[in-house]
Structures are given as structure tokens and as C-alpha cells.
């Protein structure tokens, strides 16, 4: 039988708030699907989140919840490795080492840094060095494929530049990773019709309680076409969201109702609400169970950390030896 080597896939998820439907269709779903045929490492990027969350409880809570939600949504710890970034502290050591082959100009050109400055966020070193830590996250596990959204494309290119530069200066050390930009099909609109994003306050959370979910779905912005009139499904946010959850037949049925008239946005919203609620029903149950048994989540994270750290230590030995960083402490 042909033995196809599984690829090492890695991605990080920032714990910056409750996960929403945009995150699900734009990232989480693909992450989970990749566990079937690859060796996946997924981690909660809590060191990165320090650039935006500087409240102890908030960061702790958000970190745990990302892990909880991934498990609830189908991440299988038998297939994929899930861990918290800070459980592999070697990554910050590598970030320092990489800093020394990272030109200032490269970091100064980073869109996400420039965007944040433009928004009036006062820059600190963490924000500026963010892409170097991200490069360390990727390179420390010999990652081959890094599935990210379009917004992270530049960070990945920077990672590749840093790896190539390091290999040039110190000799072949790092695997230069490929990117895998997750498909654009899934740009999920928010309740105001713009791209769904925490920063626009237009999100529908995956695990919102029913009352909140209903309130959010009912407030999706629609135009003022009267109930009796035919409506263009392709201009409707409600329809765009419904399509994500429904089967092709159900989608077609709703399309026909829009076109026929006599079907109001209120009706469509009710159907959407039922679909979202059902779609995540199983995940919601699993999540409730895990919330009652947090130890299960903790154990998964402990195991994940062990596995990830083992790999990171191996790569760090290679890195230190290639650049002449000596160590005499046997416990380090
Ligand atoms: P937010 O914009 O809410 O801060 P993040 O930037 O943390 O979301 O996104 C995490 C992941 O989810 C990224 O891979 C991103 O591409 C994806 N994602 C976020 N919002 C959407 C959306 N509306 N449609 C598709 N993918 C999205
Ligand atoms: N910067 C990524 C984001 O905001 C999160 C992240 C951190 C990441 N380290 C990573 C993604 C390594 C992929 C690989 O979405």
C-alpha cells in the first residue's frame, strides 16, 4: 500500500473573545476537517492575546474557552494535538533568536501593525514583534502547512522570509512552511451586512444562548421590501447566512420563496434561527458536558502540551546548536 506521509499542519487561534459563526465557517471547520488526513497541531495563542487583553480573568477565561469550544465542535484529541501556546515556553526563546535575523523594515511593513497604529492603539514592542513570535510558533514544530485566513497571509510570508534568512545565515535548520489560505467562499456577513468580526460588533456567537441568538438573528439588517413583494435572495444577509447551514435543497426552497413574494424577512429569520440552533445542537451538548467535567479539557491540554513540547525541544536543540547558544543546565 502506498504510504503517504501525513503533513504537519499547524495553526494558532487567538483567545480574543467568544467564537462566532464567521470564525466557524472561515477557520474552525477547516481546522477540524484537516485532522482526518494530517498531523495537526492547534494551539490557543495566549501570548499573542496579551497584545490586546491585559486583564487576568479575561485572558484566562478566553484561553480556556477556545480549547473548550474546539473540543465541543469536533476537534478529536486522538487525531489532533491541542495545546496552549504558553505551555511551550521555548517558543519565546525562539522568538528572541529569530529577532536577530528579522530586519526592522520587514516588521515596519506589517499591515496588521500599521492598521492597529492607524486605529489609535498605542504601539508597544509586543505588537511590533508579533510576527516574530508567530514565526517562532510555526517554525518550532517543523510545520509544513499553515491554514490561515487571508488577513494572516502577510504574517506567513514574513515567517517564510525569516526561516530562509536563518537557514542562509546559520545553515539548513528550519522547514520553510507552505501556506494554505482558507477559501474565500466563506466570508460570512455579520448582522449589519459587513464581514462578521468582533471588531465590528456584528457577530453571532456559536454558543450564544437561545434568547441572545434569537435577538441577534432578528436584528439582521434587511431592506424595506414589503412582505408581499418578491425579493432578491442574493442581496439578503439572512439568505447568505441560511445557505451556510442548510442543505442545497433547503437553500433552493428558500430561494423560491424569496422570488415568489408573500414571504417576509421575518419568516426567513425564523427559519435561519432554527437552523443555527439545530446545527450546533450536538456541539452545545458536548460543550455542556465538558463544562461540567473541566478535567477532561485540562487533560487534553496537558497531553497536547507534552506532545508539542517534545517536538519543540527537539527543534530547539537543532537551533541552539546551529547558532552557538550554549547551555550547561541539565534541567533547562
Ligand atoms: P475577528 O475578525 O472576529 O477578530 P479573527 O480575526 O480572530 O476574527 O479570525 C479568526 C479566524 O476566523 C481567521 O482565520 C479569520 O479569517 C476567520 N474569520 C473571521 N471572521 C470571518 C468571517 N466573517 N468570514 C470568514 N472567516 C472569518
Ligand atoms: N495571528 C493569528 C491570528 O490572529 C494567530 C496565530 C498566532 C497563528 N500564531 C500563529 C496562526 C501561528 C497560525 C500560525 O489569527
Image (cartoon, helix red, strand yellow):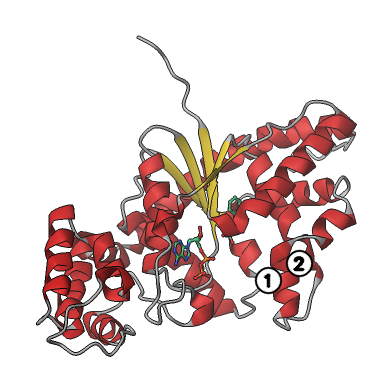
Which residue in the structure is indicated by mark 2? 126
Q: Residue at x 50, y 30 (%)?
A: 7
* Secondary element at image label 1: loop
Task: Report whether residue 286 is seen.
Answer: no
* 318 horizontally vs 308: left or right: right
- The residue carrying mark 1 has its beta carbon less than 8 Å from ligand 2: no
| Crowd around label 1: few <14 · some 14–19 · many ≥20 (10 Å) | some
Q: Position of residue 194 (x, y in %)?
A: 46, 76
Quadrant that contains the N terminus: top left
* Secondary element at image label 2: helix
* Dot placed on the residue nearer the N-terminal end, 1 or 2: 1
User: Closer to the camera, 254 or 213?
Assistant: 254
Ligand 2 sits in quadrant: bottom right
Q: What is the CA distance from the residue labelled 1 to the residue labelled 2?
A: 6 Å
Q: Residue at x 21, y 62 (%)?
A: 279
Q: Residue at x 59, y 63 (%)?
A: 46
User: Closer to the camera, 260 or 292?
Assistant: 260
Quadrant that contains the C terminus: top right
- The residue sitting at the top extreme is 1
1 and 2 marks in contact (CB < 8 Å): yes
Which residue in the structure is indicated by mark 1? 51
Amino acid at each position: 500500500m502506498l504510504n503517504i506521509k501525513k503533513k504537519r499542519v499547524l495553526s494558532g487561534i487567538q483567545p480574543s473573545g467568544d467564537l462566532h459563526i464567521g470564525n466557524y465557517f472561515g477557520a474552525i471547520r477547516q481546522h477540524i476537517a484537516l485532522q482526518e488526513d494530517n498531523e495537526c497541531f492547534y494551539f490557543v495563542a495566549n501570548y499573542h492575546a496579551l497584545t490586546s487583553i491585559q486583564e487576568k480573568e479575561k485572558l484566562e477565561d478566553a484561553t480556556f474557552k477556545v480549547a473548550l469550544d474546539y473540543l465541543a465542535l469536533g476537534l478529536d484529541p486522538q487525531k489532533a494535538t491541542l495545546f496552549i501556546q504558553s505551555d511551550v515556553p521555548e517558543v519565546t526563546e525562539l522568538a528572541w533568536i529569530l529577532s536577530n535575523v528579522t530586519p526592522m523594515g520587514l516588521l515596519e511593513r506589517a499591515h496588521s501593525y500599521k492598521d492597529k497604529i492607524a486605529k489609535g492603539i498605542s504601539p508597544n514592542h509586543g505588537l511590533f514583534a508579533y510576527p516574530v513570535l508567530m514565526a517562532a510558533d510555526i517554525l518550532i514544530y517543523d510545520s509544513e502547512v499553515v491554514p490561515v485566513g487571508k488577513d494572516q497571509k502577510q504574517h506567513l510570508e514574513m515567517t517564510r522570509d525569516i526561516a530562509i534568512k536563518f537557514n542562509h545565515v546559520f545553515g539548513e535548520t528550519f522547514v520553510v512552511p507552505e501556506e494554505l489560505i482558507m477559501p474565500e467562499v466563506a466570508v460570512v456577513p455579520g448582522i449589519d451586512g459587513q464581514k462578521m468580526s468582533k471588531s465590528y460588533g456584528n457577530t453571532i456567537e456559536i454558543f450564544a444562548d437561545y434568547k441572545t441568538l434569537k435577538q441577534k438573528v432578528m436584528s439582521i439588517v434587511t431592506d424595506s421590501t414589503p412582505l408581499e413583494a418578491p425579493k432578491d435572495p442574493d442581496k439578503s444577509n439572512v439568505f447568505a447566512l441560511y445557505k451556510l447551514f442548510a442543505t442545497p435543497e433547503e437553500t433552493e426552497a428558500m430561494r423560491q420563496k424569496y422570488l415568489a413574494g408573500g414571504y417576509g424577512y421575518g419568516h426567513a429569520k425564523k427559519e435561519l434561527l432554527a437552523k443555527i440552533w439545530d446545527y450546533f445542537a450536538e456541539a452545545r451538548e458536548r460543550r455542556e458536558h465538558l463544562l461540567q467535567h473541566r478535567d477532561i479539557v485540562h487533560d487534553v491540554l496537558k497531553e497536547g502540551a507534552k506532545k508539542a513540547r517534545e517536538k519543540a525541544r527537539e527543534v530547539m536543540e537543532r537551533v541552539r546548536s546551529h547558532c552557538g547558544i550554549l547551555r550547561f543546565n541539565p534541567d533547562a
